[in-house]
Amino acid sequence: MSVPDEEAGASPKGFAAQLARFSPSALRATLKERAVLRSLAANASWLVADRVVRLGVGLFINIWIARYLGPTKFGLFNYAQAIATMFSFASTLGLPEILMRDLVGWPERKRLILASAFILRVGGAVLVLLLSMMFIIVTRPTEPSTWVIMAFLASAQIAQSMDVIDSEYQSRGKVSRIVLLRNLNFLLFSVIKVGAILMGAGIVTFALLYSLELFVVAALMYAAAVHDGYGFSISDARVEEMRRLFREVAPQILRLAIIGVYMRADQLLIGQMLGDAEVGIYTAATRLIEAWYLVITAVMLAVTPRLAHTFHFNNDRYDTALVLVVRVVTWGSVAVALIVTAVAPTAVNILYGSAFVAAGPVLMVHGWATVFSSLGQAVSGALVNRRLLHIGVYQALVGAAVNVGACLLLIPAFGVIGAAFAAVLTQLATGLVLNACFRETRPILRVQLKAIFFR
């Protein structure tokens, strides 16, 4: 009686398959895979360390500045920053994720890709500056000091064009040097900001320091890239490559433009409807919960190259890996939301003082927006890998409609808490519900549901 081939490798075919696992080529592939995993683990550790430093020191400095400036001036600073952020789609262009994918897939073309992307980003950053200045002059024509603040904050987008270097280091799993440079520069300017507070500096000084910090770190990043052989020059750029990149990101630009509106519409509408002081109250709450967003960003930056590698070279394992990432991010966000709900009023009073006491309830509500935002952020790379960025445009459009509509209805009735509820509704719609509305994104929805319900 013969033994079936399927039994435990007992057949000659099964035995040969077992032996194949120990062939020189298979062993080399296994060692290479483990080397990639070790590199990515180190990459993740550095990125998380970067976020930890910014969480601790950055949050402390931000709270000190808020207490020093008070709700009205702190609100004005963040109102201007919200405008620059709203137009930042013209600067980022959705390039970071595209660059990550292309640098992993075409490492031999790195100088061409980086230089072309850099020129696109600088051109977009100049456009951000122009749009931001036009907006602030039209909405606040009698406040020239606000124009100066706006000019400093928006010009920082030009410096951030050098973030293309960051994409190169991340694609190679070698972010330690960039993290060290960023954090040394960040700590230096944190000390300078403390000095500005002790010397009684005005709000314009803090806007200048914000911009100067980003220009200095951009110069340091480029110097490091040249030293490590990862640099580029403007002459490396090609019009054809810029056209290719622009065609690829065109749907993403529209999506980011719409996201820019709905991500900052709450602050802008609060500023126009309730005043700068209420913007300060609202922003004080959102800045605390944004600390968790930094953690999520670190996790996604760490795993995105690995997920892109898996999608390209081992597609069968991609969904399994993505489910794990979504599960960790989502349930971690639920735990944070529960903690925030319990401690928000007390934490706000201790950290910001009695002037910001109204931020406590806002923080309690806004904490739950992070759960649905994390769901969406965890699968954003899947849209890039599956080349579904055009779907993101429709999702962002609906999200903008939900957020602006909810803000217009809820802010007059409930004040800044109404804006927080609008944020929860928006993130629920864009992070989860809308994936059910498109045939192409339903596999992504299934990944999210498996992650949520441990299936």
Image (cartoon, rainbow, N blue to C red):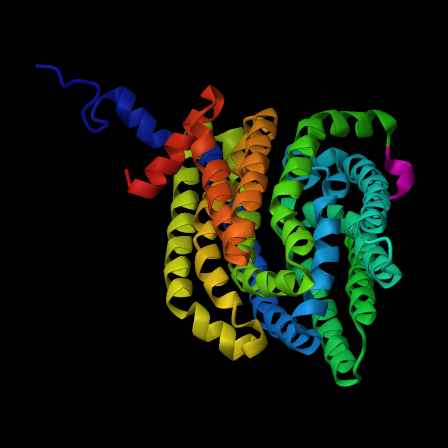
* Above or below, 183 relative to 133: below
Number of labels in the image equals 0
* Above or below, 353 relative to 117: below
Residue 270 occupies which quadrant of the picture?
Answer: bottom right
Q: Please report the residue visible at 37 percent of the width from the left and 51 percent of the height from the top.
A: 331
**Front in this rendered view, residue 3 or 329:** 329
Does the stretch in magenta take in 236?
yes
- Residue furthest to the right in view is 235
Task: Report the side of 175 relative to 437 (left or right).
Answer: right
- Residue furthest to the top in view is 1
Does the stretch in magenta take in 100?
no
* Above or below, 68 relative to 46: below
Would you say residue 309 is visible in this rendering?
no
Task: Report the side of 238 relative to 56 (left or right).
Answer: right
Would you say residue 389 is visible in this rendering?
yes
Q: x, y (%) of residue 394?
A: 58, 27
Quadrant of the frame with the C terminus: top left
**Front in this rendered view, residue 228 or 382:** 382
Q: x, y (%) of residue 69?
A: 70, 74
Quadrant of the frame with the N terminus: top left
In the image, the segment drawn in magenta is 232-237
- Residue furthest to the bottom in view is 198
- Residue furthest to the left in view is 1
Q: x, y (%) of residue 354?
A: 54, 78
Q: Please report the residue visible at 50 percent of the width from the left and 35 percent of the height from the top.
A: 310
Q: Please report the residue visible at 77 percent of the width from the left and 35 percent of the height from the top.
A: 113
Q: Please report the residue visible at 65 percent of the width from the left and 72 percent of the height from the top.
A: 66
Q: x, y (%) of residue 385?
A: 56, 30
Residue 3 occupies which quadrant of the picture?
Answer: top left
